[in-house]
Amino acid sequence: MTTAPRPARRALLAGAALLALPACVAGEMATQRVDPRNDRTPIGMGLDNRDFEEAARALVRSMLDSGRLQPRPDGQPRVMAISRITNDTTLRINTNELTQLVSVELNNSGRVVTTTAVGLDGPPDPLAMQTRQLRASGEFNQRTVAARGQMIAPDLSLSGNIIQRSTRVDGGAMRVDYVFQLTLTNIRTGIAIWQGQEVITRVGSGRTVMW
Amino acid sequence: MIRRTLPLLALGLGLAACAAPPPPPGDPRLIVTPAVQSLSFSPPVVNAGPDGRLRVNVNVVNPHGGDFPLRIQTDWLDETGRPLPTLQSRPVFRSLARQTVTTIEADAPSPRARDFRMTFDIGN
């Protein structure tokens, strides 16, 4: 067995000590359950669930307060389809997190329902259309199969952007603005009946890297 | 010397008693935690909007010399007293500017909401 020369051994020891140091400093944090209604855990420079909830809450409130979400002439709620929500941030975001919160809250308001039979890249739920193929099957009671002309077309389209702007501020800190923009478009006329924007801002260490 | 100091001390204590925090609001729908009892809360003003949704306003006075971080959580209750699951019940954080009045607003998510419960706590 060969032994490493003295300088190399010293370097190895120093390297091991350096690796062990962060573990000593950080310590072990026990896993805890977080109550989403009383979540006081620390925040980071990125976005977490609380931010999506905050943005969705403010945007839906603005939509409902605008008075533009009147029912259809037959008294039924408006039908909304989800269009494109662009993630223009450095974070990996599933934009469904935002659209789901918005559509659930709008559905609960009784003013708007969401169609899952129409979507920008195909229907979010393709089964509604596929079950129409059962009309050709003798195995199914045809009275239980959806007839022609029963689907309701959307009259509203929800689109938007999530934008990130990072700025270095005095003292070497970093300010990050996340801008949530949503637009509701009347599909018949192509006119935006409501537009809203909610900004969530963080100021923190300039050494933080977000992705 | 002591004779002069004692009345001054008594005066100081008396002034401190005058500056004691205001009593918490009497309305049972407002829940004020001990951490924010130095603020003053007006009774809630409740109105129904044209669409039947309840709207609540509460004025909060921050008498301090610095801004005050406030955490507000509003539960909306249906006719049976059960909280409605809604994003409008998530905590809202407001920074109350020093020595000013801030109006806290809350809107019910739907006409199904018949009552509310508003909890004020420090926003750390």
Image: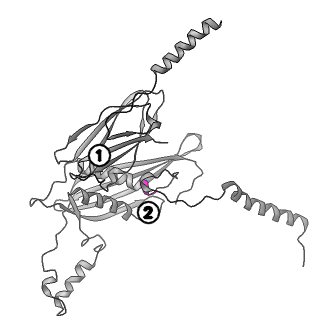
Indicate the position of residue A209 as horizontal and vertical percent values.
Answer: 56, 56
Q: Is residue B60 magenta?
A: no
Give residue A199's position: percent from left, percent from top: 39, 48
Give the quadrant of residue A122: bottom left
Q: Identify the element where label 2 is drawn.
A: loop
Q: Nearer the viewer, mark 1 or mark 2?
A: 1
Q: Amino acid at mark 1?
A: Phe
At 28% across and 48% down in the image, what residue appears? A62
Three-letter code, disc 2 = Ile
Image: magenta residue range = A45-50
Q: Which residue is mark 1?
A: B116
Question: Which residue sits at x=42%, y=49%?
Answer: A200
B2 or A102: nearer the eye? B2
Q: Which mark is residue A93?
A: 2
Distance CA(mark 1)–CA(mark 2)? 34 Å
Parent chain of label 2: A
Residue at point 54%, 42% (across, down): A169
In the current view of this chain or complex, which residue is farthest to the left?
Answer: A74
Residue B45's place in the image compared with A157, above or below, is: above
Q: Secondary structure at mark 1?
A: strand
